[in-house]
Image: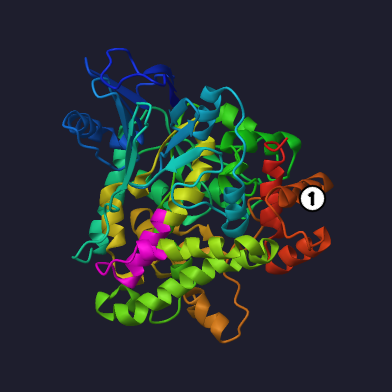
Amino acid sequence: MSQLSVKFNLIEGLNVNSSTPLYDVEHDCNNDKHAIVQMKSDWGHLVIWGDVAQKHQDAKIWHNVQDNQSPTVAGRSWIFINKLTRTVFSGCDSFGLFPVFLYQCDDTIIIASSRQALVKQLGKPLSLDTDAMRCMLTFGQLFNESSILKDTQHIGASSTFSLSLTSERLFELTTNPLIGFPQENTTRFKDALEAVVESVRRSVTNCENPMLSLSGGLDSRLILACCEALNVKLPALCYGNKLSADARIANELAAACNISLITSTDLTGHITETNSRRIAFAGQGEVPVHHAHALIDESLIEATKHHTLLTGTGAETYRAFYYDRGMPGFSAFGLKCLNKLTMPRVKRYITEEYGKTASAAYSLFPQHAEQLQSQVTELLLALNDNAFSAAQYADNFYLRVRAARMVVAGQQLLDEDYNRTHPFLSPEVVSSIGSLPARYKLSSAFHRKAICKLSPKLGEIEWDKTAKPLNQGLTLFQRYPGLASRLGLSNFFGKSAAPMFQYKYSDHTSHSLCAVLKYVGIDNAKSMRDCYEEMEKAGTLAHALGLAAVWQHLLR
C-alpha cells in the first residue's frame, strides 16, 4: 500500500494574519490511485487512504471538509490542509484500521499514515517511549492515543483532530461514537449472512489484484465460502510454519476450491536476526515477533506484493475469548433487561483477562503498577453506555480496544507491500453480526453455520480446534469450555496440532530482555533471575522475549 506523510516546518514569530506562510510543507506520497486519493481546490488539499472497498465514501469526506465538518467513516482516513485558515484537519476511520500518526517536537510537525512513513519523513530514528514499553510488557498492547514512539500520538478509531499551524499550535482532539453499535432490532441469521457476502463482493470488485489471506481458521474460511457463493476464484497466500495445522488445512481449503495457494519457501517462525530486524523496522517497535502477522516472511512478500489482501480482521470480535470460553446461559448476556446482573460480570471478565499477563509486570515495576492498572479501568468507564447489552458492551470493548490496537498493529506490517480490505468491518456487517442473538456468537456458531450453508464442501474439511470436520458440530464441553473448567475437567479446546509458529529464542535475546527491563525502570531490588522466574511463573516470559527480540534493534 502507498504510504504518506506530511511534514510542517513551523516558522515562529510571524503574525497569524500575515500573508507570509506560517509553515513549509514537505509532502511524501507515492500516489497509487487505488490506495490514496487526492482532491485539491484553490484553498484546500485533501488526501484520503484506506480500505478500497469503502472508497465510495470519499465524496462525503470531500463535501464535509469543505463545509468545515470533520467526518469519520468506515475504512477511510484523511488529512485536509486548509490554506486559508492555515489549519490541518484529519480523521481516522471508524474502527481504527488506518490510524493517523501525529508527531510534534520543537518546530516540526509530521502527520503520517504509518509509523514507518513518519520515521522516513523525519529522517532519523525515534526513541521508544518507556511508558508505552511498560504498557506493552504488561498488557501486550497500547491504549487510546499512546504511541511506542516518543513525541507521537496514535490517532485512531473514530477520532478527528484539528491543528492550527501557528506559533501557538492550537490542537483539538475529538473521539466520536463507534458506528454500527448498537441496533435496537435483533438481526436474523439470514440478514447477517447476506451482509457478509455483499461486503466480500464489494471488496473483490473495488480493488485490483485481490488476494485472500488464508489460514486454517474460521474467519478466512468464511471469506472463501463467500467467494464460492459469488463464483469468484481468488489466489491466496498462507504464512507461518508449513508443518502447522493452519498451513495443512489452508492447503485443503484451497484444493477444494481449486485456487492457487502461495506459501513461504522455508519454515517460518524461528527467530533470526534478519526477520526480527524486519519486524522491528516495519512495526517500529509496536509489533512483537510472536504477532501472527509477523509470520509473513520476505520470500512470501516478494511472491505476492502489490496485491490487495482480503483479511478477516475484525471477525474475531464476534468470536472473542468471552464467547469461545462460555458457560451455559451466556446467551442471557445479550438481553439488556438483565444488564444489572450481567454487566458487572462481563466487566470483571475483561479485567481478569487483561490481568492474566499483568501480574508479573506489577511486581517488576511496582512504582508504576497503579498507573498501569488504572488504564483498563478508565477504558471500561469510557464505554459505559446503557444502550448496550452486556454482550454488545464486550463486543464494543473488543473492537475499540483489542482489535483497533493489537490487531491493527500487525496489519501495519503489511502496508508497505499490500493494499488491504476488511469485509468483516463494513458498517453493515458490524451492525448485523453485532446485533445477532448472543447464541450465534458462542462457540463461533455464526461462522460455522454460515460456512456450511454457503459452501458445504468447506464444511467437510477439518477444523483444527476439534480435529474433525467443521460440519460435525461440537461436544458439550467444546461448546462450553468454561463449564469443563468449572467442573475441574481437563478439556483442551485450542490448536489441536502444530502451531503456526515455533519460536526459539537465542541467548542474545535473553540478554536483550535484561537491557530492556533496565531501560524501562525495573525494580532495582530484583535480580534478573528473580525477574525471569516471575515472568515464567506468570506465563509472560515468551511474550517479553518476543518484544525484546524486536526492541533490541531500536534501542541501539
For disc 1, the marked residue is 510
Answer yes or no: is residue 230 visible: no
**Residue found at the far bottom of this picture:** 487
Q: Is residue 493 left or right of residue 196?
A: right
Q: Quadrant of residue 125?
A: top right
The residue located at (38%, 43%) in the rendering is 422
Classify 143 as above or below 212: below
Expressed as whole percent of the image width and height from the top left, the position of residue 383 reads: 35, 62
Q: Which range is magenta?
A: 380-400
| The stretch drawn in magenta includes residue 264 | no
Q: Nearer the viewer, residue 366 or 296?
A: 366
Q: Quarter holding the N terminus?
A: top left
Q: Is residue 52 left or right of residue 488?
A: left
Expressed as whole percent of the image width and height from the top left, the position of residue 296 reads: 60, 39
The residue located at (56%, 68%) in the rendering is 355
Answer yes or no: is residue 122 visible: yes
Q: Nearer the viewer, residue 444 or 38?
A: 38
State the SS at label 1.
helix
Q: Quarter holding the C terminus?
A: top right
* Main secondary structure type of the part rendered in magenta: helix
The residue located at (63%, 68%) in the rendering is 359
Residue type (three-letter) at the residue carrying disc 1: Ser
